Amino acid sequence: MSYISNTADQSQAMLAACGLSTMEDLFQDIPKRLKPRSFNLPEAMSELEVHSRLKRMAGRNAADLTCFIGGGYYEHFIPAAVDAATMRSEFYTAYTPYQPEISQGTLQAIYEYQSQICRLTGMEVSNASLYDGGTALYEACQMALNTTGREQIIVDGGVNPIYCKILESYMANHAEVKLTKIPAAPGQAQRDRIKAVLCDETAVLVLQNPNFFGTVDDHSDLVEECHKRGVLVIQLVYPIAMALLKTPGEMGVDIAIGEGQSLGIPLSFGGPYLGFLATTKNLVRKMPGRLVGRTVDRNDKECFVLTLQAREQHIRRDKAISNICTNQALCALRAHVYMSLMGREGLRELAGICHARAEFAKARFKQIPGVQVAESAPTFNEFTLRLPKKADAVVGELVGRGIVPGLPLGRFYSEMENCLLVAVTEMRTKAEICKLAENLESVL
Amino acid sequence: MKIIFDKSVQGRRGVTLPQLEPGVEAQLKIDGRYLRAQPAELPELSELDVMRHFTALSNRNFGVDSGFYPLGSCTMKYNPKICEKVAALDGFAGLHPFLPQLPQGGELTQGALEVIYELEALLCEISGMAACTLQPLAGAHGELCGMSLIAAYHRDRGNTEKKEILIPDEAHGTNPASAVGVGFATKPVPTDPVTGRLDIEALRGMINDRTAGIMLTNPNTLGIFNSEIDQVVELAHSHDALVYYDGANLNAVLGAFRPGDAGIDVMHINLHKTFATPHGCGGPGSGPVCVRENLVEYLPVSRVVKKQDNTFALDYEQPKSIGYTAPFYGSFLVYLKAYVYILSLGRQGLIEASQHAVLNANYLMNMLKSDYDLPYDRRCMHEFVLSASRQAKQGVHAMDIAKALIDRGFHPPTVYFPLIVKEAIMIEPTETESKETLDTFIQAMKEIAAVANSDPQSLNAAPVNTRISRPDEVQAARGMDFNYCPQD
Amino acid sequence: MTPNDRKYTKTHEWIMVDGDTATVGISDHAQEALGDITFVDPAAVGKELKQGEECAVIESVKAASEIYAPIDGKVAEINPEIDSTPELVNHDPYAQGWILKLSNINQSQLDALLDAAAYDALTGK
């Protein structure tokens, strides 16, 4: 299948206009010694053949399991209108809105997305998006290091271990940065352990709410303690939970970040996802990523434009605050359409369903002999179970029956081999929860 | 057009959610002190309201499907629709990324792991490199990954003095920003004003024991191929410096040049440019990184391996790996589209794509060089850079020409980049455009050049056929209105 | 008119000494070249600067330019108006649009700087 429009005659006429006779003449600047030593690729396929082949490959993936896995990445229902709106090709075949007069659609949508994220998190300004939650943590930490001029990062034990691994990879290139990790444990942030390492050299404290183990917290006291010492606070949040929980804005957090996948973006085997980052007005110039501002045109008509670009790589080059350029605009658009459909009441109701079914599951699983809920603090839609045997083994047995009961935590924390992290969204019905409970009973 | 929050009507709903089953209590089991004081003020709209709003917004946009989009350095080629259809298959879109990490989970995702394994192999063959990771989430993210690999290589060898990266002055701004992001300092290498290529003598004078690497783009941002690239590599290697190849312009050389054959150590490929995945009004992209044998052991985890029984599995046992650069396996649904594109075109189709991309660019350049200044008058690759210096004397600048093109139904080329050309107009037509389209563009450019002489002021007012005129960017920057608050 | 009461640098800063302190800004030529200024980010009060070190960054819509210390000194004061009204640098670069004041200055470095006539010659006025 070829997507070239020109016919052989047209190509010949164009070559002649350039004073050339063959296609090879166009490549005379590439000397013989630099010609490919090999270019051994398959022959072309028709659209029909490609589709059949890929359909077969898709069929070898188990996308239809009854899945209780979360761990920061959740299966939520996506209304059909999200696809219908974002698949308009005026959106998805456009580039970054560098020409505002013919990009007002993208620009207004991003401005509205920024406003939605602010309303959800209680923060003052959001950027246009980052790659994902994990790289957003890295960018937010860089922002805090640059703002404070200090070099210590403290990461609470409740922060998603995948984000921690991404942060560690990048910080390995910056020997001067000291990364202090609080040991992980289910339950709320361990105040004593954090305060024991917090000092005047600390640039930033990283917290998560609900944390990786599902626990809900109010970090206001920690924020106050940090601000007394000139330390900034980053809080990772789960956007669906924000419909109910105390916001980072209410807690006085400096930088709120998170994974936006839950907002209408399919699980997609790991991406593309959506990193969001929101902060306070006084830190806006330290914020990475693109930003859309509202202004007027020459006739005083309201319009939108990319702004504060002097922070960015295409202008500041080696002095830019981040190298990011292409971001996740279409994913941000999906999130915006999703939040618009859900609306003020819909998102609250959805969060309520997730929480109610999770509480039902928690109560039901507690009745299984030998199973304990790992902590007593409140949780939103995810919680940690202690099983009487290795969680890996339990998962292995149930996957064969079409159920994935949760994420075994031994993979991340060797001391938690018996722990299973269970997530419940609106996709999991009471009947499925009961079926999982019965299956757990049968293998424990 | 009204902002979405101003369309909100209290009590209106855009979704209906399932009822809780009997026995599932609705009451919140979270103490009030953990809850937000007020609901998030998201808009209250019907599904129809939402569709009308976003359809109206889409009508205020311009994509490749709308018209000619010769945005230099961005490779705005046609995005085949089969790619979107495949990416929407539930076996791909609905797949949880944790599944292959579960015990026996590999069996649950064999199709997806095969896509990764096969695409990595295809990209290695296309680039002539030894190994590939699909993890980087965009071109700039690939640069950050590639620079991390160079840093890890030198750390591993105890090359503590290697702290500098040399970068040509015509390079994309991401290059210096990425090098600094990994802790390197950068120095610009001048471009030879006659050939438009990297000044290799200047490079010889700059390279020393502190040099960790060189980053280059070939063809460069002037659209000129550097035939001395193997000599640059040799020079770098003689100082134990590595060479990074920015694959942003790979669309010029498919089947005509492979970076690996010139000895390049590490490179990224922008799948959203060369391999036709859509730009999505600014992302998501995908920026796989390919390396030579010397860097394979540092690649990020996980790696997909093919076992003896021909099944695929994830491998995390890479002791020298730089670790995680993305949460899972990269932008899967994006590179899946690139995989579909490569299979569709096949070997000959990819070669022809580059041939037609280069032909279209040369044709445009030849037809326009009498009307505009051409600072580097020589055969170009997939793109070329004009200068509006001649028109600027009449008060018509590159930006005015860009806006005048909008009035004539085209997306403008890239302007004011590369920085080393005054009044730069950077044009990249891509291979999918027809001669008829190019001819109408040529006509428009010639007409604008004529108007720049006869009535220059009229071009300063452009565009006039759009929904808005030029925005007040100074007010945008000073006013800092990024978050809609109706009382403002 | 380029004021005669101060010195200039080749990188377009001006400096005016008054006793032990000196005031620093940018020339009319520089503000014109930058266009509409949207933000000025001066070095923090108390920062010790060597001649030629960055003492502020000035942003316009499409560019960001570093401003360098004309002589050694310590940042003593920042123009309190400049954060909220950066356009002062455009409208009145030699008076209300000053950027910062230096103390602990090295006056011996002043002689090598340009006077108004030499600066005008440099900018082709």
Image (spheres, helix red, strand yellow):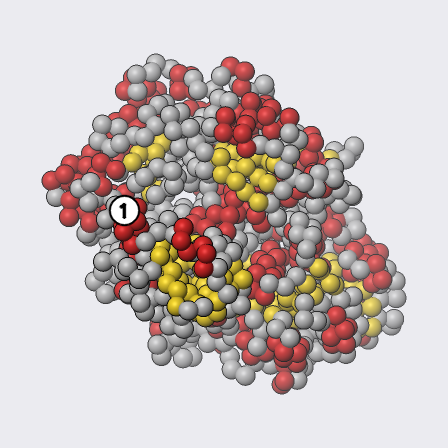
Residue A212: x %, y % from top left? 70, 66
Residue A12: x %, y % from top left? 32, 18
Residue A56 quadrant? top right
Residue B65: x %, y % from top left? 35, 43
The residue nearer to you, when weighing A118 against B232, is B232
* Residue A114 in view, yes or no: no
The residue sitting at 76% across, 66% down in the picture is: A182
The residue sitting at 57% across, 45% down in the picture is: B185
Q: Secondary structure at mark 1?
A: helix
Q: Which chain is disc 1 placed on?
A: C
The residue nearer to you, when weighing A335 against A15, is A15
Residue type at the position of mark 1: Ala
Number of dots carrying numbers: 1
Quadrant where the C terminus of chain B sits is: bottom left
Q: Along the horizontal axis of the image, is B285 left or right of B459?
A: right
The residue sitting at 57% across, 77% down in the picture is: A252
Compared with residue B442, is residue C40 higher up or lower down, i.e. above or below?
below
Compared with residue C114, is residue B42 higher up or lower down, i.e. above or below?
below
Residue A133: x %, y % from top left? 60, 59
Residue marked by disc 1: C121
* Residue A154 in view, yes or no: yes
The residue sitting at 61% across, 76% down in the picture is: A227
Residue most toward the left?
A: B454
Label 1 environment density (alpha carbons within 10 Å; few <14, some 14–19, many ≥20): few
Q: Along the horizontal axis of the image, is B444 left or right of B21?
A: left
